[in-house]
Amino acid sequence: MPNWKLINKTFLYDNTFNGLLTIVFDCYSNKTLPQKIFPLDSYISNFLDTKIYIETDEKKSTRILNGIYNNIGHDALHNSYYAFLSNESQKEMYILKYLCNGFDIGPSINNMLTLSYVFKVINIRKRALSECHKLKGLLRFQEISNNIFYASIHPDNFILEPLGHHFMNRLPNQDFIIHDKNRELCFIHHNFSYQIIESKTLKIPSITEEEKLYQDLWKTFFNTISIKERLNPRCQMQFMPKKYWKDLIETP
C-alpha cells in the first residue's frame, strides 16, 4: 500500500464488526490509514490523539461485506470476522490493512504471509477458532427452571456468538443460555431465535433438584473410574487448561 496516506488521526468506533467495516469503506475510498483504531468503550483519552468517531453505516458495511466476498473471497471474510472476535489489542489495524490490500490484490492476499498484517490476521483467527472449538466440547449445560439449559464460560476471545450458533444447530428445539462471565454477556436461545444481552439484566435461576442428582451421579462416576496412582495434573492441564476448570462440574 505504498501510495496510501497515513493521517495523524485516531479512529473510534462502536466495537462491532459492521462498525469496523464502515472504517474500511472510508479508508479505502480515501486511500488513507489512521494511526490507531480503538473501540469507544475501551479507549483511554489523552491529549496527544486527534480523535474521530466513525459512526456505523449499514450501507457502507454491507457494500464492504459484499465486496470482500466477491473480490477477495469467502476465506477473507472468514479470516476477518474471526480475527475480529479475538482479544488481540491491535486487531482493527491488522484487519484494515489486510482488507484494503486484499481489494487491490485479490484472493492471493491470503498467501502473502510475509506481510506482517496478513500473518497476524491468519494467526489471531486461528487462535479464536481454536478456543471456540475447545469450548464446543468443554461447555457444560445445566438444567435450570422452566426446562432451560444454562452454561457458563470464561473465554479469552469473544466467541459467544459462533459458539451459540453451534449449539443452536445441535439443539434447535432446546431453550438455553450461554453466559460469558468475562464480558458479562449472555447468549439466549428461545423459540428458534437468539439475542445477546448483558447478564446484569438477567436473573439466572438455580439448578433443578433433578439436575443436582445428575451432577452428583456424574461426580461419583468420575471419581470412581479415576485411578489415584495415575493422576497427572500437569498432563491434564496440557489437554484442558486450568482456566476452563471453573466451568466444569467434575472439577473441585
Image (cartoon, rainbow, N blue to C red):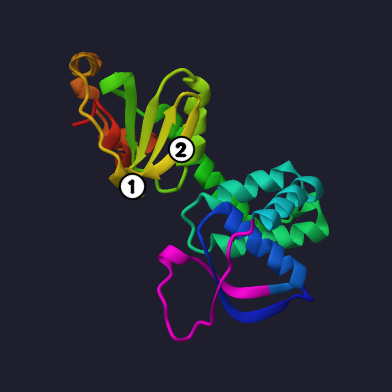
Q: Which residue is at a point 65% across and 54% down the rendered structure image?
A: 58
Judged left or right of residue 216, residue 197 is right
Instruction: Give the x, y percent position of residue 155.
Output: 39, 44
Q: Is residue 58 visible?
A: yes
Mark 2 against mark 1, which lies toward the viewer?
Answer: 2
Q: Quadrant of residue 222?
A: top left
**Which of the two labelled residues, at mark 2 and mark 1, occupies the earlier sequence position?**
1
Give amino acid for label 1: Glu
Residue 34 image position (x, y, % from top left): 62, 74
Q: Which residue is mark 1?
A: 184
Q: Nearer the viewer, residue 91 or 219?
A: 91
* Quadrant of image for the C terminus: top left
Question: Looking at the picture, does residue 87 appear above or below residue 173?
Answer: below
Question: Is there CB contact under 8 Å for labels 2 and 1?
Answer: no
Place of residue 91 in the rendered image (x, y in percent of width and height, measured from the top left): 55, 60
Q: Which residue is mark 2?
A: 195
Is 235 inside the magenta-drawn segment? no
* Residue located at (79% from left, 76% from top): 3
Residue 41 among those drawn in magenta: yes
Q: Could one spot residue 113 in this view of the protein?
A: no
Spatial CA distance of label 2 from label 1 is 14 Å
